[in-house]
Amino acid sequence: MLAFDEEFDVVVVGFGFAGAISAIEAADGGARVLLIEKASVPGGISICAGGGVLCAADRDKAFAYLQALGKGRTPIEVLRALADGMTDLEDYVTKLAKINGAEVVGRGRLGPGGIDGIGLNPDGTVPDEFLGGGSYMLPGFETFYYTSIKSVPEFFPEKEFPAQSSSSAQKSSTFGGGVRVFKVVYDNVLRRRNVQVRYNSAAVRLIRGTEQREVRGITIKGKNGKLTNVKARALILACGGFEGNPTMQEQYWEGMPIGTAMAKNNTGDGILMAQELGAALWHMWHFHGSYGFRHPSPDYPYLIRTKRVPNWKPGREQTAQVKMAWILVDQFGKRYMNEYHPYVQDTNHRPMQHLDPVTQSYPRIPSLLICDDNGRRLYPLGQPTYNDPDILHYVWSPDNLKEVDLGILKKADSIRELAAQFKMKDPDAVEASVDRWNAACHSGSDAEFGRPGGTMLPIDTPPYYGAEIWPLVSNTQGGLVHDEYQQVINVYGEALSRLYVVGELGSTFGHLYSAGGNIAECFVSGRNAVKHISGLG
């Protein structure tokens, strides 16, 4: 019989949003909680999020939307649980925010002047982010809206969470930063005296109970390499996906290589541990991502996402009015997609994973980003995003010139010269692609790929700039199958007793994603798991 070194009521693995909410709820129910984190700092990739928590006014409309969004890839009971949980999220966030006096912005603050000081669109309409918050105009989309944390008194992210990238710590979107939302849940965790937090503590293996399909503990590896067996009444896995595991990515994704934007510690640990007990998997192909730049230094191991441009909704193309400075061409010099999808940071990696069976290669990995001097002056082209104390902390320059000096961007006086610098196979094709693009800009319509007219910017003012661009993952959606109570389900459709999964380690989103949905899911799944645990003996 395996000997246990310690015992807690609930052990939570991972200190991001989902793990924090799980710990808070379990502690408030009277449980002694151990919250472990593999990294030396809290936050995971949650702290890097945009910060908008997707909420719903009507549960039936939310359910209809999630059904349409998922295309039948997720059981309706699981979708219903998420929809139900979204309807009181604003109140829940508001309750948590009392811990430190954080100012909450939600549906109740919507007025004729915008949202709590956030302005209207140039035409006087309310930004899409706050009306009909669903990313796609599917049935029920109009019920969604966002709740965020506008400010936290006496909170300085760069001091309290120095491992987190400055680009996310600053107010980089209308939602505010995920760092402020994380500050709220972080303070709530620390206030609970019956929650013990341990960093540099990696989950190694689940420990079976005496009954079939039962989990009664976990083996934890500390910073010094010491293994500790901890007994628990329930285990909650909140340790994220496999953004930092290239081996798993090669088995589940088509295109390669695909880099990670921010998550080297997310190596699929929860998936692998639960698989030993027969856990089923779902949505493994699906990830939230886009495309980005490579930094030349090995001390910066992540890809750098391109500038986060505002989302737009299919059917409302006229609202897309922010210029995107660049186009992308493949290794044959040809454009192959609309570079500005409705949600660039979610789906624009998908067209890049095309396999050419003739050449047995991926001719869009990497692609070539091209812009001119007007585009270079428009805004920083890249946005580093990370939560890692062990890497080179990099801030992209306002004018993109530092990146030219570093070699992230290359500069040329002509498109042909730029193509030569990247050893493009057909410089004529690159020139022709830029010429067609400029003609489309002057006509106001991208007949080839349907990029919204308001986002188009000619590439006709030298010098010209280029960069290799790679597909990247911000967070995975695939992982462990679970039921509406967040119980892990095995390959025979049976629940693994006392084992729960929350957050992105087996997300509900299995086909398309809706902005802010993962944060909402972290909150809802953590609460639902603990509700079920409270009924265990």
Image (cartoon, rainbow, N blue to C red):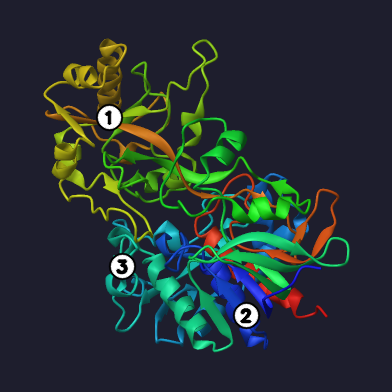
Residue nearest the observer in this picture, 224 or 300:
224
Q: Amino acid at mark 3?
A: Pro
Residue nearest the observer in this picture, 520 or 233:
233
Residue 347 position (above or below residue 200): above
- Considering only order in the chain, which callout, 3 or 1, is on the residue closer to the N terminus? 3
Residue visible at 57% across and 69% down in the picture:
19
- Considering only order in the chain, which callout, 2 or 1, is on the residue closer to the N terminus? 2
Label 3 secondary element: loop
Specify the label residue 33 is tagged with.
Answer: 2
Please state, as top left, top right, bottom left or bottom right, where the N terminus lies in the image.
Answer: bottom right
* Quadrant in which residue 80 is drawn: bottom right
Q: Amino acid at mark 1?
A: Cys
Residue visible at 75% across and 49% down in the picture:
280
Label 2 secondary element: strand
Residue placed under numbered mark 3 in the picture? 162
Q: Pointers 2 and 3 in contact (CB under 8 A)?
A: no
Q: Going by the image, does 375 lie left or right of 46? A: left
Residue placed under numbered mark 1 in the picture? 441
Packing grade of label 2 (10 A; few <14, some 14-19, many >=20) is: many
Give the x, y percent position of residue 206: 70, 61
Label 1 secondary element: helix
- Distance from disc 1 to disc 3, alpha carbons, whole Å, reads 42 Å
Q: Can residue 316 be seen in this snapshot?
A: no
- Considering only order in the chain, which callout, 3 or 2, is on the residue closer to the N terminus? 2
Residue 81 position (above or below residue 509): below
Q: Amino acid at mark 2?
A: Val
Q: Can residue 363 be seen in this snapshot?
A: yes
Give the x, y percent position of residue 225: 53, 62
Residue nearest the observer in this picture, 419 or 84:
419
- Distance from disc 1 to disc 2, alpha carbons, whole Å, reads 58 Å
